[in-house]
Image: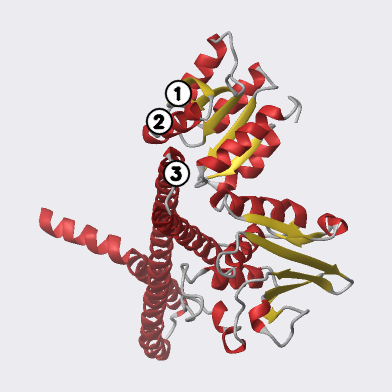
Amino acid sequence: MTKGSLMIVEDNRELSELYEEMFSRKGFIIICKIHNGKEAVDFYRETTQYPDVIIMDHRMPLKGGIAASREILQINPDQKIIFASADGSVRKQVAEMGILQFKKKPFTLLFLLQNIEKAILAPPSE
Amino acid sequence: MAMIMIKGYVFFQKYKEIVIGTLIGAVVAIADFFVDYYVFERNRTSWEDYIADHLDITANLFEHFFFLLLGFVFGYLWWRTGSQYRAHVVLHKRLEDEQWLSELLLDVMTHDIANYNHIALGNLDLAQDLGEETDEMSVFFTGIRRAVIHSNQLTENVKLLNQLHAKQLERESIFLKSIIEPAVEEVRSVYPRILLSLEMHAEEWEVSMQSHPILKHVFVNLVTNAIKYRKQDKKRVIIELEIQKDAEGILIAVSDHGIGIADELKETVFNRFEKSQKRSTGSGLGLSISRRIVESLQGRIWAENRSDSPDDHSAGTTFKMLFPIS
């Protein structure tokens, strides 16, 4: 039984593989791993099955995490996004956009796991 | 000839204010000379006038020379002021460029180091998740985790120091809840195995004050210290927060049950780049930066023994911050 589905948007391949390894071990389905914001939005427009949670990086080539999240939330305002960035200065902007959670890197995967579980349980409007 | 023209052009470019000033002085002197000469020619009626005119003309020569000198001095002062101004502009531009470059490098460095630390912590989590952890392995894992956290704190502190040095903090109305909650969560995110609890009265969450979001880092530092300097093998860390607001100011007290700070070190812990013997881990910058942040916000921060054990520093520490309302 799966715990939920995840979409990983992270330009650091080592990190996205780490997320995949850890969260698939913990019972999540990884729908896709994408390395820039533009491809993430393109994928989201075309997919028929939205992920339960998107783990979104901030600084990425072609399109950053803020712009990509904005477009994804325009397509589906109920999409739960966990925004992960090493840059704490965007916390306020992220909160104002309606992104579910902001997590400042570095954090442990255990912490992220707890927050993914919390996000899946949260009602869509939260 | 061309060479002379080039040299002349270079000279003019370098000293154009002096040349222009001197030329203006010369033009005024020549104009004055012609005016004088014309007036004397018209009024001359006798030999006595002729001699008197010549004496006047000689005296006027000094006047013409004075105009020339005045033009030169004016030009010189103009050139001097202008060159100082230009030097100032060049210096200012260079300073701005240096500032921009240092901020960019620092931003890239702190961002990328945070990412590498993130990967290191992730790998560590995976390694710990693979199987049963022996006591020996646990020591190694804790060591790696601690090193990663300290590396991150160091870069964060350097970034903060640069931010504090570079600009004046503009204060805004802030709910303490909006900075304390993310601060505690930030610490929890790197110490997931520590049961961290914050004790405070519900109404204190609603206190607001004129401050700056950077104040969050003071709470991050204080809460992190409470974990780092907890009594040995304690998995549970309790932080007590007390906020008192009156007409004069806001007093915030953050208390822990850690190893405490001896009286002779209570001031030293805030000294930049200094590390006391008992608090030997960490970057050594956290409390120094906390003091700088608090002082930038016109406040004061100091350390005391806990109020329930005023004579026993080993019962824990209370960090107090006082911010005047005005």
Q: Amino acid at mark 1?
A: Lys
Specify the subunit that label 3 lies on: B
For the residues marked 1 and 2, what is the alpha-carbon distance in whole angstroms? 8 Å
- Position of residue B231 measured from the top left corner of the image (x, y, whole percent): 59, 70
- Position of residue B131 measured from the top left corner of the image (x, y, whole percent): 43, 40
- Residue at the spot x=57%, y=71% of the render? B287
Specify the subunit that label 1 lies on: A
Mark identifier at residue A33 = 1
Q: Splitting the image into 4 quarters, where does residue B144 fall?
A: bottom left
Question: How many residues crowd mark 1 within 10 Å: few (<14), some (14–19), many (20+)?
Answer: some
SS category of the residue bearing label 2: helix
SS category of the residue bearing label 1: strand
Q: Splitting the image into 4 quarters, where does residue B71 fall?
A: bottom left
> Image height check: is B117 above or below B325?
above
Judge depth for marks 3 and 2 and give the one in front: 3
For the residues marked 3 and 2, what is the alpha-carbon distance in whole angstroms? 23 Å
> Image height check: is A110 above or below B195?
above
Question: How many residues crowd mark 3 within 10 Å: few (<14), some (14–19), many (20+)?
Answer: few
> Is the C terminus of chain B in the top left, top right, bottom left or bottom right quadrant?
bottom right
**Residue B326 in view (yes/no):** no
- Residue at the spot x=65%, y=58% of the render? B216
Residue annotated with mark 3:
B132
Mark identifier at residue A17 = 2
> Image height check: is B40 above or below B106?
below
Q: Amino acid at mark 3?
A: Glu
